[in-house]
Image: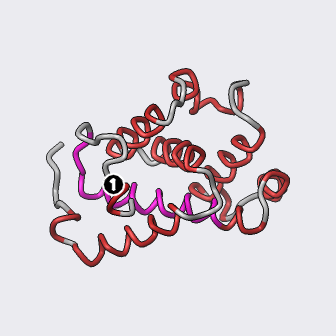
Amino acid sequence: MEPRINAKEIGHEAYRTMLGFSSYLAKCTIEKKLQHLIEFRVSQINHCAYCLDMHSKDLRAEGESEQRLYMISAWRESPVYTERERAALAWAEAVTELRDGEVSDAVYDAARKEFSDQELIDLTMVVLSINNWNRLNVAFRTEAGGYQPGQWVSAGG
């Protein structure tokens, strides 16, 4: 598919707004590796090739195993994720998909066992942010493949 618009080059103000979100996440209570894991899973759900490329490379650069990357779409059936990661993945999927217009009490209760109030807010911000990036990149067909690990760190992304 042919890219449509380069949002970074054309939509400077909008892009700066998105980077502000990313700057907050760089300092939040959720560990970076878990953020990337959530970003990777949500990008699968949203079919965002650019973000899948980015977050798989960042995860590998942080020492994530190939096995965990390959198994993430079946995380419920896989023994390689911690309880904290499972709660985060369930929360991320529920917030992304909003089935029946809500996040279930069961998903919320599982998240509350693993995350403090501030961490749950920050985890939600991670999910909101990647959903925004996914929608921007999918809508404008941002081309995947050229990302280098850590490329956006200095830009706040």
* Residue 143 on the magenta segment: yes
- Mark 1, other Cα within 10 Å: few <14 / some 14–19 / many ≥20: few
Name the residue located 69 percent from the left edge and 42 percent from the top edge: 85
The part of the image, by quadrant, that contains residue 96 is bottom right
Residue at position x 37%, y 68% in the image = 19
Relative placement, left or right, of 49 versus 43 is left
Q: Residue at x 77, y 57 (%)?
A: 115
Residue 80 lies in quadrant: top right
Name the image quarter holding the N terminus. top left
Quick one: SS at disc 1? loop
Q: Position of residue 20 (x, y in %)?
A: 41, 72
Q: Magenta stretch: residue 133 in it?
A: yes
Is residue 48 rendered to the left or right of residue 100? left
**Which percent across, then down, holds residue 64?**
53, 30
Considering only vertical position in the picture, is 3 above or below 85?
below
- Amino acid at the residue labelled 1: Trp
Q: Which residue is mark 1?
A: 152
Foreground of the two, 98 or 62: 62
Where does the image place residue 117, in percent across and percent down from the top left? Answer: 77, 67
- Picture colour scheme: secondary structure
Specify the segment rendered in magenta. 122-144
Q: Main secondary structure of the magenta part?
A: helix
Residue at 29% x, 58% y is: 139
